[in-house]
Amino acid sequence: MQNQAEVFVLSMRSPDDVSGIVDMIADGRLVPRKIIAILGKTEGNGCVNDFTRGYAAQSVRVLLTGHLSAEEIALIPLVMSGGTEGGLSPHWIVLSQCDGETSGGPALAMAGVITRPLDPRETGRSAQADLVRDAVLQAMAKAKITDPADVHFVQIKCPLLTSERVASVGGDVATEDMLKSMGMSRGASALGVALALGEIETLEDAQIGTDLSLWSSRASCSAGIELMACEVVVMGQSDSWSGPLHIGHGVMCDAIDATAIDRLLTQIAPDADRQQAQGRVVATLAKAEASSSGMIRGNRHTMCEDSDISSTRHARGFVGGLLAGLIGNTALFVSGGAEHQGPDGGGPLAIIYTTQKGKLT
């Protein structure tokens, strides 16, 4: 027998709405002890004071206390990403596994690792990147992915700085700007992925958030106030896993790179039309970022100049609309803030899909 991946995308009426997960456990489709990670796209602002992420994570933990011990729950990454601007739909993505038959080819493989809590002085610095690098390698080993080329996406939830956390270490931190700390934490985590996958060889503190030539093609990092550790979920392909689920990835060169999405849809169903390919998409994960140049293909944008709304919120809604139109679905895990995640203004993209007709959700 081999491990077989299971991926369930469930609607969320509110950050505390875990009814879809409850129903799946009740009817036996989801076994709590087999859960690898739970991702949630919540309807908050996605900024420092977005408490929908912590509310959603807390709601899942309360649910799981009826099935698992506190120690078991603490080992499950609960990656909550705030912000469903535009037509994006709040939802859960439950990653699990079951026993599968031995197959002759690679299939979707997944594993999660939670690091130790970061010292605030490590946040946004190379120490955080090193911690994430080690966690990615550990998760790869757990998932039995031996070649970094077979890793297609690494979803990470990482901490940010608050005034209390800064004060606790006497101000010796990467930045005292709380909003900027989100970007630096995301960037450090992404570069940790790049180190693990051989996309870069070395890293210095001064390069984080400044040297945009350094980036990972497979990292998706979200920062939040609700944790101090880094929660790392590796998704890829492995011959040690079986089943109909697979994953492919690409990189959007900018916020309107429809070609990158079309390439992935073609990979899903080479001999089918777009509508047939859409029918095989199980989950979509992507990064969104407003280009720091203030330009998109020669035209000016104002996402970075809006004093009322964070550029990450603009970017999520903008990229989410493009993805929804091409994929035919609004339940998309689009995360804003792509520092060192893809080229400036672009971002990594991954699609989990099935080789069977219809969706396995």
Image: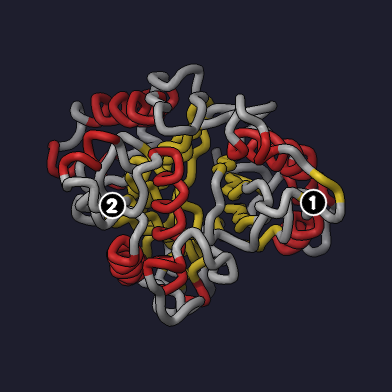
Determine the secondary structure under disc 1. Answer: strand
Q: In this view, does 201 lie to the left or right of 87?
A: left
Determine the secondary structure under disc 2. Answer: loop
Q: What residue type is labelled 2?
A: Val
The location of residue 280, given as percent across then percent down, is 68, 48
166 or 60, nearer to the observer: 166
Please identify the quarter of the rendering in which residue 59 is found. top left
Number of numbered discs visible in the structure rendering: 2
The location of residue 32, given as percent across then percent down, is 28, 39
The location of residue 137, given as percent across then percent down, is 33, 71
Identify the image's colour scheme: rainbow, by chain, secondary structure or one colour: secondary structure
Q: What residue type is labelled 1?
A: Ile
Q: Is residue 55 left or right of residue 255?
A: left
Image mark for residue 173: 2
Please identify the quarter of the rendering in which residue 257 is found. bottom right
331 or 121, nearer to the observer: 121
Q: Which residue is drawn at 34% across and 68% down?
A: 133
Q: Can residue 139 be seen in this view?
A: no
Q: Which residue is drawn at 65% across and 40% down?
A: 304
Image mark for residue 296: 1
| 1 or 2: tag closer to the N-terminus | 2
